[in-house]
Each structure stands twice: as C-alpha cells, then as structure tokens.
Amino acid sequence: MPDLRNKDLRELPIDYGNALCGILISEDEIQQQVKKIAESIKESNKMWHCVIALNGALFFAADLLRELRDCTYDTIQVSSYEGTQSTRTPEIKKSLSKPVKGRDVLVIEDIIDTGHTAKFLRQYLEDQGANSVKIAALLSKPDRRETEICIDYLGFIVPDKFLVGYGLDHNQENRNLKFIAVKA
Ligand code: IMP
Ligand code: MG
C-alpha cells in the first residue's frame, strides 16, 4: 500500500487561512484506495459484521461498505483523544446495539496512531465472544506506535503529522472535507 511519509503536499482548492498546510491525499486517491481495500476484503469470502468506530471512520465506512457484498454493521464510539493528544486510556462512549458473539467482526477505523484504541477494540470484541476480529484502517502512522497491532487491511501509511478531513477532525472541525489535509 502507498507510503506517503515523504510525499509533497498539494495546494488546497480554496484558502483555509492558517488552518491547513496542504492536501496529503486527494479525493480521487482516497476513492481508488478504498476500492482496493474492498477488493482484498472480498477475497476473504466471509460474511463480515462490521463495527464502525465513530466518529472518524464514518466516511471511510460509508464508502467501503458500499463496495462489499452481504455485510452487516453496527457502530461503537471509543474515545481516547483530546485535541491533538492521545489520552492512551480508551473508554466506550457509545456501545454496540447488537451482540457480536459468534460473528466474524471487521473493525473499521479511520487511523491507527499510537495503536491503543485498536488494541482495546480488538480485546473488547474478543471478550464479547466474536468468532474472529480483523481490523481495516484507512491510515496508519507507524512512527507514532506505542503498542504492537496487526492491521489486516490498510489504505495508506502516513507521516507523523496531524491530519484532518474524510472523517478526521481537530476538535470536531474539518471532518467533512473530501480530501485529507495536514493541519497547520
Ligand atoms: P490511537 O489510539 O492513538 O491509535 O488513536 C486512534 C484515534 O485517534 C483515531 O481513531 C483518531 O480518531 C484519532 N487520531 C489519531 N491521529 C489523528 C490525526 O492525525 N487526525 C485526527 N484524528 C487522529
Ligand atoms: Mg477515531
């Protein structure tokens, strides 16, 4: 998968003042890579029960799941971030609506940063009796990892910079951008 750690930023379509530096991943690049991730997931030939990690993975999940066949989904919200800092102690803010017992669960995450949230979610879902738990993440920042985590399906490796757009926010702002930009 593409490693964007040395990629030059592209110019923003409109002036975002001092808020954003430039585009790291364009709308087209995101959409192409989401299709590729969906292709690999489909090769597993499993009936996935997707668990979407709100709020960040909302846009990724909406595009990814529409490329899959025969999947179901539920949402969970785990919080570990304040501003640009990970608190390292994930807590469930919104729980699942249906049991995952016996199901093949695919966690849909926006970005794996320190790794604490994904690790917590995997353990939580295993404890709830899931038959198997795999992780699909659009982005990974390996340079920030604090705990080892296996990402089963990944879109892009990104640099250690704070990113916004396509679901990623900074204090709830910029989630709705169609592209992924570096925050100034
Ligand atoms: P982790 O527990 O440190 O891996 O954090 C994962 C969560 O932190 C992600 O699901 C995001 O919500 C948030 N996060 C990490 N890096 C960024 C970023 O660059 N921009 C926005 N949110 C981020
Ligand atoms: Mg998140």
Image (tube, grey):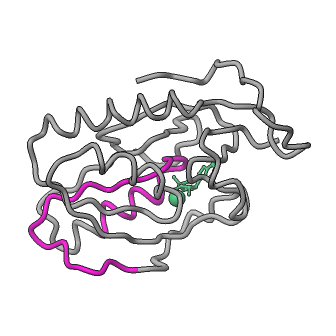
Q: Position of residue 172 (x, y in %)?
A: 68, 64
Give the residues drawn in magenta, as a range. Answer: 95-124
Q: Magenta span has 101?
A: yes
Residue 72 as seen in the image, left or right of residue 88: left
Q: Residue furthest right?
A: 17
| x 47%, y 22%: residue | 2
Q: Is residue 19 above or below residue 120?
A: above
Q: Position of residue 43 (x, y in %)?
A: 14, 34
Residue 54 as seen in the image, left or right of residue 6: left
Depth check: give the residue in front, 3 or 38.
38
| x 22%, y 66%: residue | 126
Q: Quadrant of the N terminus?
A: top left
Residue 162 as seen in the image, left or right of residue 118: right
Q: Position of residue 155 (x, y in %)?
A: 42, 34
| x 12%, y 39%: residue | 44
Q: Is residue 183 above or below residue 21?
A: below
Depth check: give the residue in front, 82 or 110.
110
